[in-house]
Amino acid sequence: MKKIKKAVIPAAGWGTRFLPVTKSTPKEMLPIVDTPTIQYIVEEAVRSGIEDICIITSPYKKAIEDHFDRTKELEQLLSATGKEALAEEVRAIGEMANVVAIRQKEALGLGHAVYCAKPFVGDEPFAVLLGDDVVYHGDKPCIGQLMDVYADKGVSVLGVQTVARENISKYGCVAGRQVGDRLYTVEGLVEKPKPEEAPSNVAVLGRYIITPEIFRHLENTKPGAGGEIQLTDGLKTLAEEQGMYAYDFEGRRYDVGDRLGFLEATVEYALRREELRDDFMQYLKGIVK
């Protein structure tokens, strides 16, 4: 069985939930404290042992590519002014992984964005991490948890968590049976069902391990919900062919494409920072009063 060595991060969307700032700034570059959201995603992949990462971008998101490049002039300036620790932090961003970018030239949906990565992926199984979802786990990164399931089962794995049934219409929904601790078979997938029609409240939340046969299915997938080529539709036919599992991953998941979710992530990540926690906690207690 081939090891997971590559990851794809779709990041070509307009970010309409965050307008007007996303008119000129990629939503993936919005900072949680002082770190762009997409850096948290890349770091999760790197912590899981993945070194080759493909970010699917658009012509308006060059800032993402620039962020993961080296900026030697800035590094030299920081070193020359005695800020060596900061220079090393900036240097490490450009060296943390082999990051390439492929542009999705038309906004045809998540399935099409993943299909754009076919030349990068080749015939290997790969990880997909959506840029709207940041998952915090102090010990085991979310995508690493799914990689462990893939190593055991040898088929595609979806990262899921249970949500309130009234919220299932925001997500892809899994129909299946629980067959182990936090583990489900995938017997059906529905993209953003109405709550009363949903087969479960098990939602697909932005993390996947996918076998390369998905590209054949995406190539033949017709536009679905919203007139877009949906990854869910391609995964559904792949599950029928190969079988598939869903894993209820451990960790705190934030929808950072949503304004409230972004604010929650900002507050909670700040409180995890030793140099900020005490003063920030005092500030929060003060405004709550």
Image: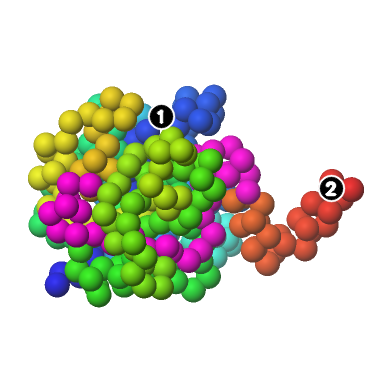
- Residue 59 in which image quadrant: top left
Q: Is residue 138 above or below residue 126?
A: below
Q: Where is residue 258 in the image (x, y as percent from the top left)?
A: 54, 38
Segment tinted magenta in the rendering: 236-264
Q: Quadrant of the N terminus?
A: bottom left
Tell me the distance, in whole angstroms, between the alpha carbons under discs 2 and 1. 34 Å
Q: Give the labeled residue for mark 1.
A: 14
Q: Residue at x 43, y 35 (%)?
A: 194
Q: Position of residue 98 (x, y in %)?
A: 27, 58
Q: Where is residue 163 in the image (x, y as percent from the top left)?
A: 51, 50
User: Is residue 164 toward the left or the right of residue 10 in the image?
Assistant: right
Q: Which of 119 and 213 is in front in this view?
A: 213
Q: Nearer the viewer, residue 18 or 156?
A: 156
What's under tag 2, amino acid-wise? Val
Q: Residue 288 carries which label?
A: 2
Q: Which residue is drawn at 23% across and 66% down?
A: 4
- Residue 103 in which image quadrant: top left
**Element carrying mark 1:** loop
User: Is residue 223 toward the left or the right of residue 34 in the image?
Assistant: left
Q: Which residue is drawn at 31% across and 30% down?
A: 225
